[in-house]
Every structure is written in structure tokens, then in C-alpha cells.
Amino acid sequence: MGDVLPDASAPHITLQINGLIYRYTAVKDPETGMIVHVRNEDAIDGGYVFEETDDWSGLPGTTIQKFFSLPYTDSTRWGDGEIAVEGEGSVVDANVVYSYRMDIGQEQITCLNPLSSPECPGFLDALRKYLANLDNLSPDDPFYDQWVQAQLEKETKLEEETVANEEDQEEEDLEKELSAENTMDDLIDSGQQAAMLAALTQVPKIETYYTVTIPGGEYQDTVILEDAEIPDNRRAMRSLARDETHRSMVRSQYDRNQ
């Protein structure tokens, strides 16, 4: 593991493993049997400090990815790792990533790898790059909680910035409306007025209407009076007589007062 993990040989440095992610693609015939072991030897007690077995027997080959959150274990116990295949088939594009924490003394954390701790500078950028290389994220991933927290903080920050920008824009709009320096262009939509005037000055359309010629020649009068004389309207005559009487009465009153 010396070429995978940072050097923790100095007596004041403690390196602990707390998670593991592996990914590979199995190449095999669906009818054949195949078992894949992903494991690390236990350099102190013998056996394996980590071992996971995938049984591909009777299954077609495809890509598999698994996440493991582990109790903090001193790196001195983690011996050589391997991906061993039993049966007919092979493994390609294998990748194993270890999550670890390095302590100097009791409290200080060295950040040779920004992912060592959320306290390391550049932790979020390193986490985004790490997640970009994965197809999905599982709650079993050792960085899942930090990723969720980072996403929540990012969304909260964006919401706060959006609300602040909206409030600033509302204040600017209100100040502009209340300002005494508003120009005519601010108070009136000059573009809309120009469009209205252009619509009213469509002379060719009006002239086309007035110059329409109605076909036809002389139209003969079709009204025929059956009687030679038109009788007087007696009702109208009675109304006129009453009007005349009324005017005489009013006039007599006026003459009497003279």
C-alpha cells in the first residue's frame, strides 16, 4: 500500500483508513461461472482486513461499483490489495480508492490529500472532481454526508443571493418611479406610440376602400303610391290645435301682467 497511501512512517504521524470504493468491468460469457474477490491483506493479524466477493456465475459481464464506510483502522494493518478472479472471465478498468485521515500529534491534520478532511483547503473542489468520475453516489460512500452538506450550503447561498438581487432591483425600480427626473421616454412607451401612429397613417388601405366601384347602371324607383291624395293626419292636427291653445293662454297671462 506504500504506493497508494501517503507515507506515514514517521513516529508522530498517524494514518487511518475509513472507507473504500472499488469499480471494475467484468468480461465473461453469461453461461460461465466467475467469482471476483476484492481484498486487502491484514499485515498484522493475518487474513484480510477487507474482503468483498462478487459472484458473476450465470450473469453477463458489466460494470460494477461499490462503496464501503469502515471504522477507522490504522494503515499499518492494511497490507497488499488485489482483485482475484476465479472461473472463466476477466476484469478490466479496475479502480480502487481509499478514504483516509492523517493526524500529526493529537489535533493537527495534514492535507496532503484535500479529501483527507472537510477542514482541508480545497476540500469541496477536490470532492467535486472526485464525484465527477463516478456514475452515481450512494449513502454508503464515505464522502456522502460531506457532499450533501456542500450541496445544501451551495443551494442556500444561491437562494440568498437571488433574494438579495431581487430586493435590490425592487428598490432601484421604486426609486426610479419616485424620482422627479423621469424623462418622457421613462413615462411613455415611445415605441408603442410610434406603432399606433403608423397604424393610423395607413393611407393606402383607406384609399382602397373609398375607390371601390360598385357595378351597375340606373336604378329605377320602385315605390308606387296607390292613392292620388295623401290624407291629413288628424291626430297631428289635434295636437297642433292644443299647442296653439296653450300658447294663447300663456300669452294672455303675459299680456295681462303688462
Image: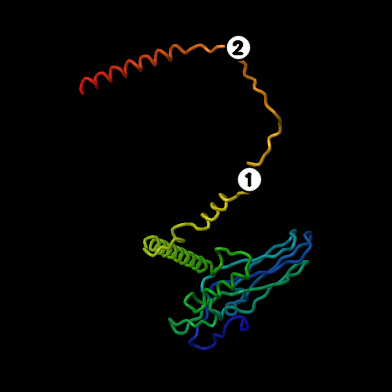
| Residue positioned 53% across, 73% down in the render | 18
Tell me: residue 226, above or below residue 181: above
Tell me: residue 63, above or below residue 77: above
| Residue positioned 77% across, 64% down in the render | 28
Tell me: residue 175, above or below residue 20: above
Q: Amino acid at mark 2?
A: Glu
Determine the CA span between mark 1 and mark 2.
44 Å
Image quarter of the N terminus: bottom right
Q: Amino acid at mark 1?
A: Glu
| Numbered label attached to residue 226 | 2
Q: Residues within 10 Å of mark 2 (few under 14, many from 20)?
A: few
Q: Position of residue 8 (x, y in %)?
A: 54, 85
| Numbered label attached to residue 207 | 1
Q: Position of residue 56 (x, y in %)?
A: 72, 62
Tell me: residue 76, above or below residue 70: below
| Residue positioned 66% across, 42% down in the render | 211
| Residue positioned 72% across, 63% down in the render | 62
Q: Quadrant of residue 174?
A: bottom left
Pick whichever, 142 or 123, lies toward us: 123
Q: Is residue 182 left or right of residue 201?
A: left
Q: Earlier in the sequence, mark 1 or mark 2?
A: 1
